Amino acid sequence: MVTVWTFVAIAVAFVVWNRRGTWRNIGESTADYARLTTLRARRQRQSLRFGLALFVVEVIAIVGQLAWFDRLTLRSVLLLGASAIVVGGWFWIVRRRIASELAMVAEYQGD
């Protein structure tokens, strides 16, 4: 349970830190909109990287604990592998969405 609550505390602290300053009015000009949208997209990219890194650390901790208590089985390895595929797919989809959002903002800034 200590491991779970430690990871929860780390994730919550990151979310609070990463979202600071992004939930305010967009502004009155297109430049304000583009600036804040870019800031939000960069913060989402940081969140994405953090989530992936946290997942890797959690998998390492889980494998270590399962091995320590002689509970590491083929089934648990397959479940961790399946979850890694899901997280990898999530990472890829969200990364593409963020890239398209940044490209859209770059078009606005170019006009």
Image (tube, helix red, strand yellow):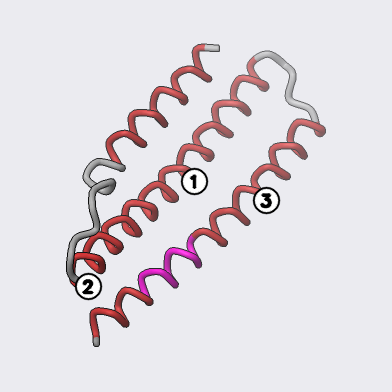
The magenta segment is 95-103
Mark 2 Cα-neighbour bin, 10 Å: few <14, some 14–19, many ≥20: few
Asked if disc 3 and disc 2 are in contact, CB closer than 8 Å, the reply is: no
Q: Nearer the viewer, residue 32 or 106?
A: 32
Real-space Cα separation, disc 1 to disc 3, in angstroms: 12 Å
State left or right for residue 17 relative to residue 58: left
Q: Is residue 107 magenta?
A: no
Indicate the amino acid at tag 1.
Leu
Considering the numbered disc 2 on the image, is that residue within a helix, a strand or a loop? Answer: helix
Q: Disc 2 designates what residue? A: 30
Q: Disc 1 designates what residue? A: 52
Percent across and percent down for residue 50 are: 41, 44
Percent across and percent down for residue 10 are: 39, 27
* Residue 56 vertical position relative to residue 7 in the rendered view, above or below: below
Ranked by sequence position, the earlier of labels 1 and 2 is: 2
Q: Is residue 100 magenta?
A: yes
Real-space Cα separation, disc 1 to disc 2, in angstroms: 33 Å
The dot on residue 85 is: 3
Indicate the amino acid at tag 2.
Thr
Q: Nearer the viewer, residue 38 or 67?
A: 38
Q: Residue at x 50, y 67 (%)?
A: 96
Number of numbered markers:
3
Ranked by sequence position, the earlier of labels 1 and 3 is: 1
* Residue 11 vertical position relative to residue 41 in the rendered view, above or below: above
Image depth: mark 1 or mark 2 in front:
2
Residue lying furthest front: 28
State left or right for residue 59 relative to residue 80: left
* Residue 23 vertical position relative to residue 77 in the rendered view, above or below: below
Indicate the amino acid at tag 3.
Ile
Percent across and percent down for residue 38 are: 28, 63
Asked if disc 1 and disc 3 are in contact, CB closer than 8 Å, the reply is: no
